[in-house]
Amino acid sequence: MNRLFSGRSDMPFALLLLAPSLLLLGGLVAWPMVSNIEISFLRLPLNPNIESTFVGVSNYVRILSDPGFWHSLWMTVWYTALVVAGSTVLGLAVAMFFNREFRLRKTARSLVILSYVTPSISLVFAWKYM
């Protein structure tokens, strides 16, 4: 709408406003990711006084040929699938229970919501009196 009246784009101003957020995101996300990728190609000793050496993809070959890695990966995938499925089924069952008509339905719903809100309220008071 602004473009119709002024004849120019708001894109430079929008990018100027986004720049601090993008820099922060780059510093907190992109830089550690790039650093970890770089470290994955090095043999990095625990002692910081010893020089690290470039080993290429041998770290990847070693980890992918280790049966313990594949066992750990399988256990992680299995655990994740069970937790996601279990949480979904349990959440659906609780939602269906609270959707039925029963005598103290509003009170029960309020108590469930209260259990979510109480930690936040406690934090507010803790920060208020610090």
Image (cartoon, rainbow, N blue to C red):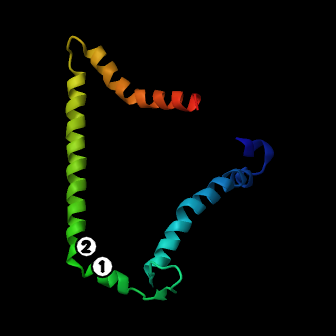
Give percent across and percent down for residue 113. Answer: 36, 25
Is residue 32 toward the left or the right of residue 76 in the image? Answer: right
In the displayed structure, 56 sits above or below 48; it is: below
User: 75 and 90: which one is in front?
Assistant: 75
What kind of residue is marked 2? Answer: Phe
Q: Assess whether mark 2 and mark 1 are in contact (beta carbons under 8 angstroms).
A: yes
Q: CA distance from mark 1 to mark 2?
A: 6 Å
Q: Which residue is mark 2?
A: 69
What is the crowding at mark 2: few (fewer than 14 residues within 10 Å), some, or many (at least 20)?
few
In the displayed structure, 98 sits above or below 27; it is: above
Quarter the N terminus occupies = top right
Is residue 31 toward the left or the right of residue 44 in the image? Answer: right
Q: Which residue is mark 1?
A: 63
User: 126 and 81: which one is in front?
Assistant: 126
Which residue is depicted at the point 20% across and 69% down?
Answer: 71
User: 89 and 46: which one is in front?
Assistant: 46
Please give the label number shown on residue 97: none
Which residue is depicted at the point 47% across and 27% down?
Answer: 121
What is the crowding at mark 1: few (fewer than 14 residues within 10 Å), some, or many (at least 20)?
few
Is residue 55 toward the left or the right of residue 112 in the image? Answer: right
